[in-house]
Image (tube, rainbow, N blue to C red):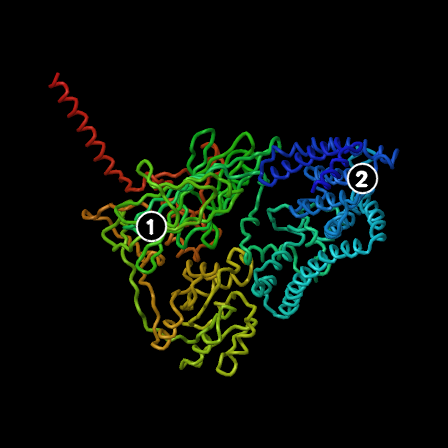
Amino acid sequence: MRHKLEILKQYTQKKGVSISLLVTGFSTTLLIISLIGIKLKYSDFESLAIISLLIEFAYGIILSSLILKSKEEYIHLLPFIILNWFIGCFCLNTFIPVFQDLPVWVYLTTFTFCISNFFIYKNSEEDFNNLVFFFINGASFGIILYFAFYLIPFTPLSIVGILALGMGFYGLVPAIVLIVHTLSILRYLQRNRLYFFSFSAGISTVFIGLLLFIIGLTIESRKIADTVIIKSFNNNDDLPAYISVSQNLEPNFFNEILLKKDIVYMAPDDFFSFRGFNSFGGKQFNQRKINNPFISIAYLFCEDPGLSNDDKINILRSNFDKRLETEEQLWNGEDLFTKNIKEDVKIYPDSRLAYTEITMNIACEKKSWGDEEAIYSFQLPEGSVATSLSLWVNGLERKGVLTTKEKAKKAYKQIVGVEYRDPSLMQWKEGNKVVVRVFPINNKTPRTFKCGFTTPLKVEDNEMNYQSLSIKGPNISKAQTISRIQIVGNTKIETSKNFDLKSGFYTNESEGLDNWHATMPLNKIHSNSFTWKNKVYEVKDIQKTIIPFTPSEIILDLNNNWTNKQIESFVNLKQKNIYAFINGRKTAITNENFKAILLDFEDFHYSLLPLYKLSQNSLIITKSGTFSANFEDIEDSNYLKKIKNGTKQRNIKVINIGADINPFWQTVKEQKYVDYFQTSFKNSLKMIEKHQFVQFKTDTNAVNIESAQVTILENPKSNLSKSNGTNHIYRMFAFGKVLEEQVKIQADTLANNQYVDLAKDANIVTPISSLIVLETDNDYKKNGIEKNVDTLGNASINNDGAVPEPHEWLLIIIGISTLYFYHRKNKKQTV
């Protein structure tokens, strides 16, 4: 150890080493701080990279001239100049993204290569070299080869840049280092065979790792290409061609990389192309391009699957839950982060409902780069509905106004895209999702918005369960979060995260947004109702009825979730009319062919059954997974048009024997295209044998909330009617009615449809209505949006009871006036 310290001391005493260490350490520190700042969205630190670049540029010129002028005297500084050249390259890349975004491992590998050079290059009799450093140098040398190849197209620009500003030199650095290092390393490898073996072992290790990665990626690309070819023979013009690929594509690490080619990850084709980095198709994907050398090299060996970028984005949406990344974004939002979150939950056990209010503070660290747009996606529990939206404008809370989805979208685009002023928009999305947009946000004007959601409590095993919301948006992981939970009544509750009693409320402080749930004993439904406009809305236990049902045919909705035993059990029933759809054709299933048929579905993840082709009174047995395309993905297809026009009248029954439900079946269920029931595999067999089907009792004046096992009844108000429940009861009733009747609504009659008025009355976001906040009252008038009058208005955590009707207001005023005059009279008498 003492010997090594003496060697290091001697090296630092050589000419120029001390100043080189100082410059390198200072520049590296500035670069690291800058990169961390960019990664964490603290863009103020980006300017540090410019300072580092200027230092490196001056240092490089001086040191290069000294080495060229007096090689023997300064050659020991060659490792310093190579290291500082690459520091300069990375600094330049922070504001002129020639390399695009680089993974962390690329920076570490490059620095490892440069550091190992100090132990390999020598200019004295002291032996600084050993086998470990030759191995490390060989393992990291590949990154230099990659950079040199990658920058070939930029060589002419780099030469011009040298003549103009001098900075163009950094475009030639990898090629120069490649030549210099190759000439230098060959001298050492010729002197000692062990050095050669060690260096070769380093290169081979990386090569083997890359080879294994390429093999995995090429296997999956071959599968996709084969699927595209095979499915191209299916003459199904009703669905988009990419659907068949999506149905047969497993969401895994390799497939996501393949689908993100040219969209997120740079392909080798991009190296020799100067087209816009985001010009990849008609659809948008909100993620910056990444230059990952391993992935880019592997793409060279992968077969082109023949999918357009729009098709790949659609598959990413359905198979990989990338819907937020594909939302239309009018303005960039890369530099935003969520600063604070307030999560306020109020639970109504007697109504089996909960109201969750989320307040978000959004900030932007980047200076003088204009305004940005924030987009948040809220994944809601089944049956939930958005019931409030507020945006703070000039320090004051402005509440959302409910209107048709077309008017809201048009107004938002006009104000954001043309007028650049303050709006916020809340939209309903399929699959229990709600999207909220906020504009503008910059470093001087952080924004605050609040939104609320009414949620049924899910009933399972004699318990009621509340599930927190899943939220995606600008950098939520570091937000300072405070959660509060309130219980109406004396019901005991248990939560999966700790809530402390403070100031009379149970609260929790954390970082980011936790996924948590609360459970409580199942309450019996007592008289719990809400009165509104001469109607009373009462919560009752849901009524199940067993009806006689003999299906005309049984369709097994097969996919890779099914087992041989399950199919065999259905085949062994005394039913001769059991079928499955194979490549769009209805095929009978028998004891002789069911095993072979299941093989056709071993890579099949979800189906989109042609419900409009089924016989009257058909029964579908499904076992769905968690993902699929939904109606929004196929909205322009003939398939969806036929579903809407030819399904509901067929009296189709569906039994789901799985624990999950995918977005397709969720929408079909919600919009009442079929009668849907979820039960166990064994129970489904009994129902078929007994020619029975379980239905929830329905009526024109009732809405079933199946997850909460309750029904909300609408009846005329009487003198005996009570209003002892929350107004969320009426909001849930209205949401259920809109979803039930949505299939009847034509796009060109939305504005005059009674269900838009119902949505306005209850202030709920639905497939036909949205909430919007505009800066001024005049903005609403210009866009033809009427403000809420005589409606429930926005829900609130502190105001959830009955709203007095006009005659009740009169009685209240008379009562208050009487008390006032009585008080004054008594006061005078006392005096």
Residue at the far left in the pictured view = 829
Task: Give the tally of numbered discs.
Answer: 2
Residue placed under numbered mark 1 in the picture: 494
The correct choice, above or below, for 509 with respect to 703 in the image is above
Residue placed under numbered mark 2 in the picture: 78
Q: Which residue is depicted at the point 23% across and 48% down?
A: 717
Whole-percent x and y of residue 803? 29, 40
The correct choice, above or below, for 693 with respect to 461 in the image is below
Give the secondary structure at mark 2. Answer: helix
Q: Which residue is depicted at the point 43% across and 34% down?
A: 398
Give the secondary structure at mark 1. Answer: strand
Return the residue nearer the eye: 288 or 779: 288
Specify the quadrant of the image occupied by residue 123. top right
> Is 122 displayed left or right of 325 in the figure?
right
Return the residue nearer the eye: 34 or 385: 34
Return the residue nearer the eye: 370 or 9: 9
Image marks 2 and 1: residues in contact by CB distance under 8 Å: no
- Which amino acid, by three-letter code, is at mark 2? Leu
> Is 613 displayed left or right of 315 in the figure?
left
The mark lying in front, picked from 2 and 1, is 2
Counting residues from the start of the chain, the first of labels 2 and 1 encountered is 2
- Quadrant of the image for the N terminus? top right
Return the residue nearer the eye: 104 or 799: 104
* Residue 785 seen: no
> Is 228 displayed left or right of 771 in the figure?
right
Q: Which mark is residue 32?
A: none
Label 1 crowd (10 A; few <14 / some 14-19 / many >=20)? few
Whole-percent x and y of residue 375? 52, 43
Label 2 crowd (10 A; few <14 / some 14-19 / many >=20)? many
- Which amino acid, by three-letter code, is at mark 1? Glu
- Quadrant of the image for the C terminus? top left
